[in-house]
Image (cartoon, rainbow, N blue to C red):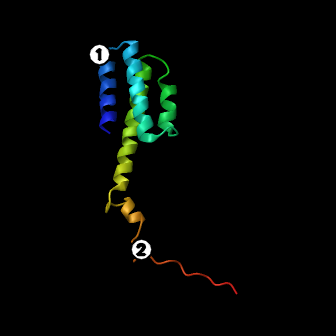
Amino acid sequence: MDQINELINMAQALLDSGFDVQTLINWETAAFIALLSLLGPFHYYTQNFKRLTSQNDAKALLAGEGVLMAAREEIKKAFERMKPNRPGGLAQDFAPAATYRFPAQRRTP
């Protein structure tokens, strides 16, 4: 998650200070690798990042930053759902076996 935050901050710094094409390409490569490692190759954000950042200009950098921000929020939500004993968390999705009651089986004649 720190890597995503660093890339978002770097994008903002590049937008504020100006950038050369090689710096933008380096940022795009690092951001794509981060998305690939965190979300996998088939996730919507990973698949569309390259399309949205295909132009080497400020609009592409801004679009890429937006994808990273959206990915960060999705990852945060996923971690929140995984925390035990939280409303809506995974711990509530799985009742302990001792308290779970299986539905009555219907017997067919």
Front residue of this view, candidates 97 and 53: 97
Residue under the image location 32 percent in, 60 percent down: 86
Residue 91 in the image: state x and y as whole percent.
Answer: 37, 63
From the image, tell me which residue sits under label 1.
17
Query: Of discs 1 and 2, which sits in the foreground?
Result: 2
Residues at marks 1 and 2 touching, judged by CB atoms closer than 8 Å: no
Q: How many labels does the image show?
A: 2
Quarter placement of the C terminus:
bottom right
Residue 50 in view of the camera: yes
- What amino acid is at disc 2? Ala
22 w.r.t. 51: above or below:
above
Find residue 59 and report its image quarter.
top left
**What is the C-alpha distance between the residues marked 1 and 2?**
58 Å
Dividing the picture into quadrants, the one containing residue 35 is top left
Q: In this view, does 2 lie to the left or right of 48?
A: left
Q: Which of marks 1 and 2 is nearer the N terminus?
A: 1
Locate residue 95, reporting x and y percent. Answer: 40, 70
Residue 73 sits in quarter: top left
